[in-house]
Image (cartoon, rainbow, N blue to C red):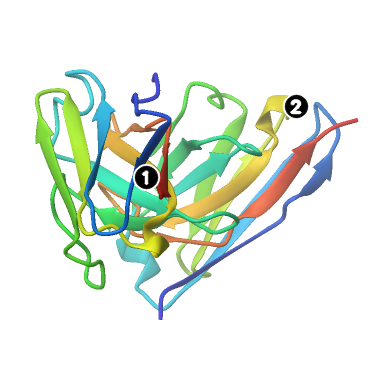
Amino acid sequence: QSALTQPPSASGSPGQSVTISCTGTSSDVGGYNFVSWYQQHPGKAPKLMIYEVSKRPSGVPDRFSGSKSGNTASLTVSGLQAEDEADYYCSSYAGSNNFVFGTGTKVTVL
Amino acid sequence: EIQLVESGGGLIQPGGSLRLSCAASGFTFSSYWMHWVRQAPGKGLVWVSRIDSDGSSTSYADSVKGRFTISRDNAKNTLYLQMNSLRAEDTAVYYCARGSWGFGNWGQGTLVTVSS
């Protein structure tokens, strides 16, 4: 049950795009289409942004999109806004009813 | 409105026990898998445990297996986490979360501090 690997930080100017990677193995990210992404502002609970690799819950702006290739999933935030500055975590089903989170990425809006 | 409200956290000595609760409302509790996720101070999210909708199946992270027990009372719309043999490294905010293949709704969390 090793954590999925994310870059510690990412940044972009308002209006630009930023992409965060989430690398696992064939036993988690690569083996199932159950990758999800969460946004967490300081002192707040996480919020689901993407589920099942690329689906957006209602209320989440379409600036947020997800994809997967092999053992790596990605979250892209287009048209960066100040309120997008937060920590982002990926998560994946890992088989046998187990789950794993990524190491987290701090997104800074310059 | 879906609400998840955790309680039961606090300061506990190493080796001690604590039971967390998560009161659910605004949805049919008995239809959903539920999870516990924790976050140590300044650290990332870590999945702890899962229970299926009727409580017949549970799973745990290796770090808590044999020490923590997840359970639920569907009549009371409440999720529990019994934590035994607590260690300093169990210090964290514990969140309950609703969902099957992802965590769609989260509570506000309850802080557990394990220290002498």
Query: Which residue position holds label 2?
Result: B88
Q: Are marks 1 and 2 on the same chain?
A: yes
Q: Which mark is residue B106?
A: none
- Which residue is depicted at the point 22% across and 67% down? A61
A49 displayed left or right of B20: left
Q: Chain of mark 1?
A: B
Amino acid marked by disc 1: Ser
The percent position of residue B100, horizontal first and vertical second, equals: 28, 50
Q: Rounded to the nearest whole Å, what is the CA distance between mark 1 and mark 2? A: 30 Å
Q: Which quarter of the image is occupied by the N terminus of chain A? A: top left
Query: Which residue position holds label 1?
Result: B56
* Residue A102 location, quadrant: top left
B71 displayed left or right of B30: right
Q: Is residue A91 visible?
A: yes
Q: Is residue B98 visible?
A: no
Query: Sequence-wise, which precedes: disc 1 or disc 2?
Result: 1
Amino acid marked by disc 2: Ala
Q: Does residue A64 lie above or below B113 as drawn?
A: below
* Residue A93 location, quadrant: top left
Which of pointers 1 and 2 indicates the residue nearer the eye? 2
The percent position of residue A110, horizontal first and vertical second, equals: 41, 50
Task: Indicate the secondary structure of the residue bearing disc 2.
Answer: helix
Label 1: how many residues lie within 10 Å, few (<14), some (14-19) or many (20+)?
few
Which is nearer the eye, B100 or A87? A87
- Which residue is depicted at the point 91% across and 30% down? B116
- Which residue is depicted at the point 34% across and 31% down? A98
Task: Indicate the secondary structure of the residue bearing disc 1.
Answer: loop
Q: Chain of mark 2?
A: B
Which is nearer the eye, A93 or B41? B41
